Amino acid sequence: MADTPRKTQTGPVMKSHVDITWRLGKYDGEARFTLPPGVTALIGPSGAGKTTLARLIAGLERPNGGTVTLNGKTLFAADRRINLKPEAREVALVPQDSTLFPHLTLYQNITFMGRISEADLMMFCERAGIRQLLDARPHTLSGGEARRAAIIRAVACNPALLILDEPLNGLDPLRRKEMMALIRELNRKASLPILMITHQTDEMLHTADSAILMQDMRATITGPLEEVFSRPETASLLHLDDAGQLLSAKVSERKSGMISCTLGPQRLWLPDDGETVGSLLRLRILAHDVAIALEHTKGLSIVNQIECRLVHAAPARGGFDLMLVPEGTDLQLSSRITAHSLNALSLKEGMTVYALIKAVAVKELISEASTG
């Protein structure tokens, strides 16, 4: 297999932009965003236009107007009549159907148009759990094995952008977690920006850095995952089962089987899973896991008691949703309590309260601490 890596950009990182309109049947579509260098989750309800947008970027469909640029290279420009063919775009799209060639072995499939070294290929195959299957034919593979092979085949082409359409469908929970880690590793080690279409909350939280929310054929919200995921429109469109907040926090200390994460001047203690001091974690704290006290309380098994200001209280299903700001930060926490608790504690906006955090729904390592 040829080892002809794509040239990397030296100097300042060149940004990629999508600014296009299209029509599908009787519906008009529109997307305008800058694609960041990390993993971006393309999210939204079924029928929102996510797969169509991916095909437009890859050159499999033609927009009505606008421009698409990738690392400064113009892929499409309606006003200049530029519309590069898919094979000239350096965009690898892995569709929901794995589309492996049935007459080739798995190794032959993966090395078809391959442009990475044999050592890197074998490393990625090992990480994806398919190295022992390289002599097999596609018809002997499970759906999950075929999906993993299709992803590695796309990576072997050494693209400038990798687009994954529902990449983890058909995988068991253990393999899903391994593949989520592999997707992040591909982004970090191969400096490969990834656009990942997904409906699954855990895939977004464990994998993505940024998100694009689509609704009715339009990209409506873009930005860091923590911001997009915490928006009420996102919860409504994705039918999230509970309110909550997504936070980033840095590991500052480890002690007695726990790690301490900083939230401004305050600390949040979590189970120690071996994260390096200085690492950045992503935390999802659900509203029903946050109780309220009027003062710091001794004699509780709940370690985390965060001093907060109550900034808003709104009626919600079965009670009230509280919005809390930990003192000394611009972060937000949510708490869902009953109307009885609201009245019993005489809670009012502007009060100082203590958020008693009972659990963290997600604790995911985003980045390792620098050793330099």
Image (tube, rainbow, N blue to C red):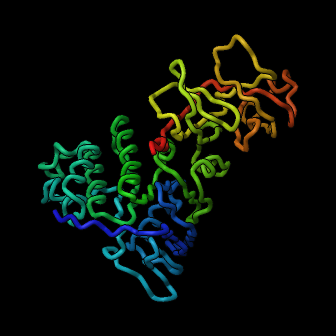
Vertically, is 103 above or below 199?
below
- For residue 253, side relative to residue 162 (left or right): right
The x, y position of residue 249, in whole percent, is: 59, 39
- For residue 275, side relative to residue 353 (left or right): left
Residue 316, quarter of picture: top right
The x, y position of residue 183, in whole percent, is: 38, 49
Residue 307, quarter of picture: top right
**Considering the image in quadrants, where does the N terminus appear?**
bottom left
Q: Residue at x 84, y 23 (%)?
A: 345
- For residue 348, side relative to residue 241 (left or right): right
The x, y position of residue 189, in whole percent, is: 36, 53
Outermost residue, front side:
372
Q: Residue at x 53, y 60 (%)?
A: 48
Total marks shown come to 0
Outermost residue, bottom side:
80
- For residue 104, side relative to residue 87 (left or right): left
Q: Residue at x 34, y 59 (%)?
A: 94
* Residue 359 seen by the camera: yes
Q: Nearer the viewer, residue 6 or 219?
A: 6
Vertically, is 4 above or below 98?
below
The x, y position of residue 93, in whole percent, is: 36, 63
Vertically, is 121 above or below 301?
below
Outermost residue, top side:
299
**Considering the image in quadrants, where does the C terminus appear?**
top left
* Residue 169 seen by the camera: no
Q: Residue at x 85, y 21 (%)?
A: 344
Vertically, is 108 above or below 176?
below
